[in-house]
Amino acid sequence: MRGTKAVVCPNCGALNRPTWEFCVRCSESLESAAPAAASEPTATAVGGELEPSATAAPANSILLAGVVGLALLSAAGWRAVAGSSSGTAPSPSFFTIGTEPQALPTPEPRTGAAAAYESGRRALSAGDVATAVARLAEAAAAEPGNAEFKIAYSHALWRSGDKDAALALTAEAAALDPRLRIQHARSLDVAGRSEEAAREYAAILEASPGAVTVRTDLGRLQFRTGDYKAAASNLQAAVEARPDDPVLQQEFAYSLDQAGDRAQAAAAYSRVLEQAPDAVISRGLLADNLVEQGRKDEAVALVEEGLRRQPQAPLLQRQLGSVLERSGRPSDAAAAYRAYAALAPNAPDAQQILARAAWLETGGGRR
């Protein structure tokens, strides 16, 4: 479990409680979130307000024997604490000149439920799933209105293999705290309950249409289930928010391609190659797209350009053979197929490709 310091969302920069797993503002995962910088007033978002908490004074501050017992600070003392010689008043989120500092929050006593929760989380981190299930069940039963306890208990149940019970708990937690709905939707998705997950994602977007992470998740779910037209719509919004993500761009391009929008798909594939020119799969998909549009010479040139960059790439050689064959150049296609088999002699389709080359060389590809 993270410490008491607030953590910064890696997607939107919002401050969040250290125990939250998803950002309160954008629903991004906080798994890799960093603690707030020591130079910033540490705060956590709570219902639109900020809760202050203790921050370390700079190295050149007055030696303090105890924060709660601070004496009144003069303006000169403030300059020492702030490390400034200008006499500018400190941030109002700290103290006011000439007054005592705000009282630090008194730590809440660890109740039986909280102790069980902490014990269960530690057990889960250590891989002791049985103990985690027992302790977190105790915490959740003691405080049935605590969404955080329910989510932790659901994680333990999921690890134990009881996915139905885990999903029931994420649903209860989401009902208590709507910010956890994305976690419930993702759990449904991972469990293979795609239709329910899609409905949950859609409901979240109805309330928060600008939630890019949710739109991305829904688009990718639709992509995996073959609903390419819907996927393209959601992934377009995601791509506009994250234009530098080539993987997201390729998923968007492929969705467009499968939905029949060849021209827009070609443009999206091209943007992938601008960011990642050695992306072999994207280059091959764009080549296929261009052939489908009747732009065969462009397709051949595109694959040949890739081979100049990566002459030892077997997939590009096979792609070149395919594009040449569909462009009515059987002998050139056969040569490309043989080059592929030479580069990847142990590939599962190497012998099949060699047989294809021989067939083309004997006139099988002539019309």
Image (tube, grey):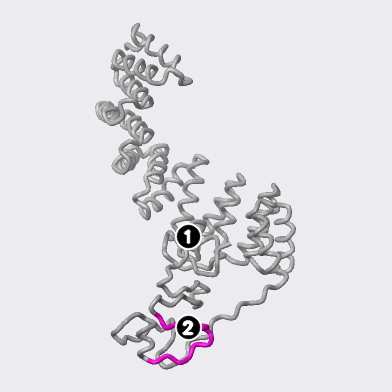
What is the quadrant of the C terminus in the image?
top left
**Rendered residue at 41%/52% (across/down):** 238
Secondary structure state at the residue bearing disc 1: loop
Of badges 1 and 2, nearer the viewer stands 2
Asked if 305 appears above or below 55 in the picture, the reply is above
**Residue beneath label 1, please?**
33
* Residue 319 image point, x, y percent: 35, 25
Quadrant assignment, res 87: bottom left
Q: Residue furthest top?
A: 362
Q: Which mark is residue 64?
A: 2
Q: Amino acid at mark 1?
A: Ala
Q: Looking at the picture, tell me which residue is in the foreground, 111 or 190.
A: 111
Image location of residue 164, percent across then percent down: 69, 50
In which quarter of the view is residue 298 placed? Answer: top left
Quarter of the figure with the N terminus: bottom right
The dot on residue 206 is: none
Q: Is residue 185 magenta?
A: no
Q: What is the spatial separation of the Cα atoms under label 1 and label 2, in whole angstroms?
A: 31 Å
Pointers 1 and 2 in contact (C-beta within 8 Å): no
Q: Secondary structure at mark 2?
A: loop
Part of the protein shown in magenta: 61-74
Near mark 2 (Cα within 10 A), the count class, few <14, some 14-19 or many ≥20, is: few
Observer-nearest residue: 102 or 257?
A: 102
- Check the image and report above or below for 191 versus 48: above
Is 68 situated left or right of 341 in this image? right
Dot 1 or dot 2, earlier in sequence: 1
